[in-house]
Amino acid sequence: MITAGIDAGAATTKAVLMRDREIVGYRISGTAFDFLTSAEKIYDELLLASDIDRNDVEKVYATGYGRNSISFADRGISEITAHAKGVYFLFPEVRGIIDVGGQDSKIIVVADGNVTDFLMNDKCAAGTGKFLEYTAKALEVPIDDLGTLALASSHPAGITSMCTVFAESEVISLRARGIAKEDIAAGLIAGVAKRIMVMAKRMALTDHIAFVGGVAKNAGMKVAFEKELGVTLFVPFEPQITGALGAAISAHG
């Protein structure tokens, strides 16, 4: 049985193909003009690369912010459920998930792949990839290099504001004072980590925790979380696809 999962995120669109609950392939691309166009394009590319005809796919499930726009999907499921199932497939022992994406952050408590509780921040850019993206721009550092740069710091700068606009101004001010870029980067990442840890502690996450989402590719953020939690996090081989993976698994039944 061949199934597909589409995760229509605000920043990126992800697609996963599975055959008999084994991953055949996946694709990740920026969400362009609209959710449906982005999903159609990435899905067709994945089918072509996997040498699978669209008619051979028995079910397609969609998840993510734009899931209701994916008209070719058989069903839509919440991203909370999708991430839980995707992470459970990869790490059955996980009991908590930290998902930090471009537009929101989530703390999900799970048991045997089922969601028992969750907390989401989708009202403020602080604690999301967008915050890091904007502040990295103010620091004149590519977002992909921000985490590595932060790891080189021995004296992280104190960032007093977690409001994106004020944090950008603070970064510029710190640079004007001659504070090293790596120390500013470390301060930014530490600030985001502490904010998300407030959510994690409210959900009583202690161990067996997975870190997923685009920000999980930031090595500095992983280290910051591990320092706050005192545990080693589980990070998938591709942390952006757990939602799409969970949707494909759900489609299999």
Image (tube, rainbow, N blue to C red):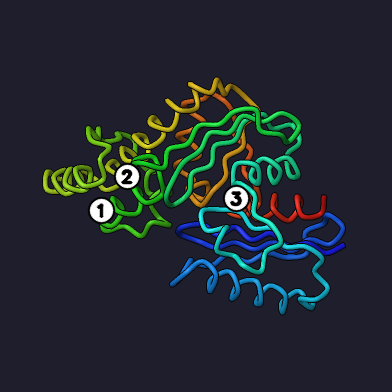
Q: CA distance from mark 3 to mark 1?
A: 25 Å
Name the front one of labels 3 and 1: 3
Name the front one of labels 2 and 3: 3
Classify mark 2: residues with Cα within 10 Å, few (<14), some (14-19) or many (20+).
many
Tell me the quarter of the picture where residue 155 sits: top left
Q: Secondary structure at mark 3?
A: loop
Residue 66 placement (x, y as % from top left): 52, 58
| Relative to 60, 162 lies left or right | left
Tell me the quarter of the picture where residue 55 sits: bottom right
Nearer to the camera, 139 or 249 = 249
Q: Residue at x 42, y 38 (%)?
A: 121
Nearer to the camera, 3 or 190 = 3
Residue 60 placement (x, y as % from top left): 72, 62
Q: Quadrant of the N terminus?
A: bottom right
First reached walking from the N terminus: tag 2 or tag 1: 1
Whether 135 is drawn above or below 188: the answer is: below
Q: Which residue is mark 1?
A: 139
Q: Which residue is mark 3?
A: 239
Of the numbered discs in the image, which one, if any, rests on residue 185? 2
Residue 224 placement (x, y as % from top left): 45, 34
